[in-house]
Image (tube, rainbow, N blue to C red):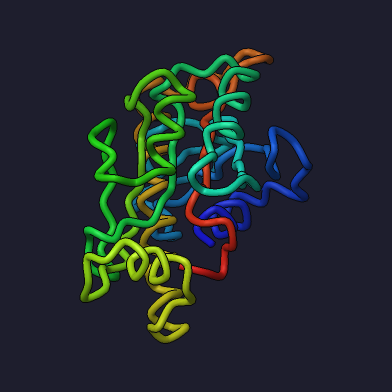
Amino acid sequence: MVADALAQRWELGKSKDRFKGRLAEGRADLSAGASGARAPGAVDGDDALGGAPARGPRVAVLWPQTYMNDVGRSVGPARGSYKLPIDRVLVLHDEIDLPFGEVRSRRGGGRAGHKGLKSVSRALGGPGFWRVRVGVGRPDSTDPEIVASYVLSRFRESDAEVGELVDRAREAAERVVCEDAQRSEGARPSEGARQGGGARQADGSRRREDAQR
């Protein structure tokens, strides 16, 4: 869901079947802030972060089509193909240890029992990738079967609440990309690289079905 929102926001076009998933490529639109509003004083050709070209860094959004606990089989080959350093990979994932509606971003960190993150870490050779953690809350049980059923079920919250959560997560992902572009001072990538200074790979590895928790 968040990966879909990013692809739509950046107008990446139709995805292709690659790396055991779907892949859409293009450039991140940095002509507006993460909220979608132009920064005060911004002019055509400048982004919201102080002078970098509005035509932002090359990006790719990957929707793995593997099972969640095997998602590294999709993310690893994609990262290798584009020769990305690990800190140019951004993983979007749900997080039961955060209340519904809370979104946090960080680089590295533990896996907290998340089998998808374990698979990605193993495939990338470490946990040093960026991640946007999308809070979905935890059921009133520690029983593994109940927890598994919860994270695979549809959201119980209203469509409006889910939509707001997706927007917050999308904005968090855009901030990571924008800050990376600012650090690289808008340098254009070489032709075989992929994100920020190459292209940034955003991996939407939540669950296998986008409509499910």
Task: Report the residue at 26% width, 73% height from top.
Answer: 139
On screen, residue 134 versus residue 9, left or right, reads left
In percent of width and height, residue 74 lies at 61, 34
Q: Residue at coordinates 52% horizontally, 69% vertically from top-left? A: 212
Residue 82, quarter of the rendered image = top right
Q: Position of residue 165 (x, y in %)?
A: 38, 68
Q: Quadrant of residue 16?
A: top right
Q: Count the marks: how many?
A: 0
Q: Nearer the viewer, residue 53 or 165?
A: 165
Q: Residue at x 68, y 47 (%)?
A: 12
Residue ID at (45%, 74%): 163
x%, y% of residue 172? 35, 51
Compared to residue 110, the image places residue 99 above or below, namely below
131 relative to 14, above or below:
above
Residue 11 vs residue 120, the one in the foreground: 120
Find the residue positioned furthest to the bottom: 158
How far from the left and from the top, in percent, is residue 81?
Answer: 65, 19
Relative placement, left or right, of 26 versus 45 is right
When the figure is inspected, residue 68 is found, relative to residue 124, above or below; the finding is below
